[in-house]
Amino acid sequence: MRAAPAPGEHPLLPVVGGEERVPLVTGGEARYAGLDVAASAPALVWVAEHVERVLPLYASVHRGAGYASQVSTAVLEGSRDVVAGFVGARRDDVVVWTRNTTDALAVLAGCVPDGGSVLVLDLEHHANLLPWRTQGHRGVTQRVVAAASTLEGTVEALERALAAAPTSLLAVTGASNVTGEELPLARLAALAHHYGARLAVDAAQLAPHRALDLARDGVDWVALSGHKLYAPFGAGALVGRRDWLDAGTPHLAGGGAVEEVGADDVRWATAPARHEGGTPNVLGAAALAAACEALSALDDGALEAHEQALRARLLDGLAQVPGVRVVRALEDVPSSIGVVTFTVDGVDPGLVAAYLSAEHGVGVRDGRFCAHPLLARLGLPGGAVRASVGVGTRAEDVDRLVAALKSLVADGPAWTYEVVEGRHAPVDDPRPWPEWGDPSARAAAARPCGG
């Protein structure tokens, strides 16, 4: 009898483009090793097939008498139930459709009671640092707590801040988009509630890797993105307690968000409609729900085992490359998702990423990952390199990354690179590009998040 493959040896679920081959500047081609899942995950094959099933009956939702409209309405509203179940929502929680996690947290920011105070850590993604700052006209203030070098020290710092002043909301990441380190959500929820605050979780990174359970852990709201959950069709969600969402500032004023409009007055709907003005992204919602169903159908522990095997393989490999340093923020975190950030001594992170792509067909992320305060605190103002794994990753992808880094350190790049519009690029790049995706045709691109 043939032994079952070890976790991580093969993809856990099939993804669109999983066998796609890309050209190399040195000649030939290689199967694309997409190790940038933390930025945007490829669509699951199941998700893409579900979108194809929905498309023929796609129509505008709510109040439409036509057959397609009624089917699309059922798809949209049924998808809410699926997402609610995926995050373990309470029976009276509400699911608000958004564009992504940033949009979801912006919805919640507009619902923090006037004069409220929001507490965040300095290790957050900008999506959980900036929305609260936009509410100053309502007297909402933000307080930033510097994380300690340990998880225990960081929790103690949060408790001191909660005890020092009244706080409406503690908003934290579920897992760092830079280091992959997880925070203890149930513990933080209990801490926030003890001091009269509520807890919101940026689960953009956590949701694709770990099961969420709002009811069990006492989390009040969770925000997530479809494009990180293998459903890159432009939808996200804010899920959680209804009271603030029913009373908060409507996120997008317009049709569908109201009960009644007069010449000089308006009666706003309650959530979720209150924050979903305009025609919703039906296909995005359907895709997000399909992804949630596919991940939920995996055997218990399969996702974590797959990911942890790949993470351990990556860390072991990086430890064998001279001059490579793995970045950590919290020394004593017991669990991390499949995100690993590192630096290579003497080599600019942008050059590392360009080299991996152009010469080895490996996609990673470089820069400051929309987490400028954290990178500054870690002493990396010039950024770093991030590799991230997911359900479509296989051991071969990790091995190719490690082998490429060993070659880079030993021999340097085989090609010449220059900085173009702020990014490293191969000089006289010979690779063919599809007409609909030629980088030379794009407008000058500022580096997102300033790098």
Image: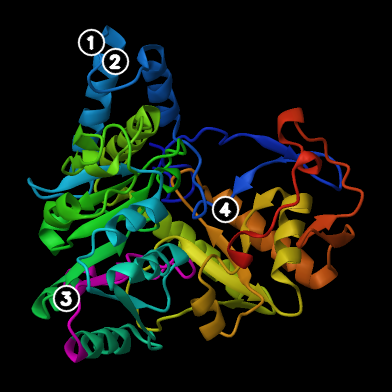
Q: Position of residue 96 (x, y in %)?
A: 26, 44
Say whether residue 149 is visible: yes
Mark whose residue sits in front, 3 or 2: 2
119 vs 230: above or below: below
Tag 1 near tag 2, CB within 8 Å: yes
Which circle, 1 or 4, is nearer the viewer? 1
* Marked residue nearer the N-terminal end (4 or 3): 4
Q: Earlier in the sequence, mark 1 or mark 4?
A: 4
* Residue position for label 3: 192
Determine which residue is flagged by label 1: 65
Under mark 1, the amino acid is Ala
* Relative depth, front residue between 205 and 3: 205
**Residue at the image point whose x is 22% and y is 30% from the top:** 77
Q: Secondary structure at mark 1?
A: loop
| Residue that appears at 28% across and 57% down | 108
Circles 4 and 2, Cβ within 8 Å, touching? The answer is no
User: Which residue is farthest front?
Assistant: 264
Q: Please name the amino acid that badge 4 sits on.
A: Leu
Q: CA distance from mark 1 to mark 2?
A: 7 Å
Corner quadrant of residue 282:
top left
Q: Which residues are magenta?
A: 163-188
> Which residue sits at x=38%, y=32%?
281
Residue occupied by mark 4: 35
- Name the quadrant of the N terminus: top left
Q: Position of residue 183 (x, y in %)?
A: 30, 71
Q: Residues within 10 Å of mark 4 (few under 14, many from 20)?
A: many
> In the rendered structure, which disc, 1 or 3, sits on the residue that comes first in sequence?
1
Which residue carries the number 2 mark? 69
Which callout, 3 or 2, points at the residue further toward the start of the chain?
A: 2
Residue 9 location, x and y as percent?
49, 48
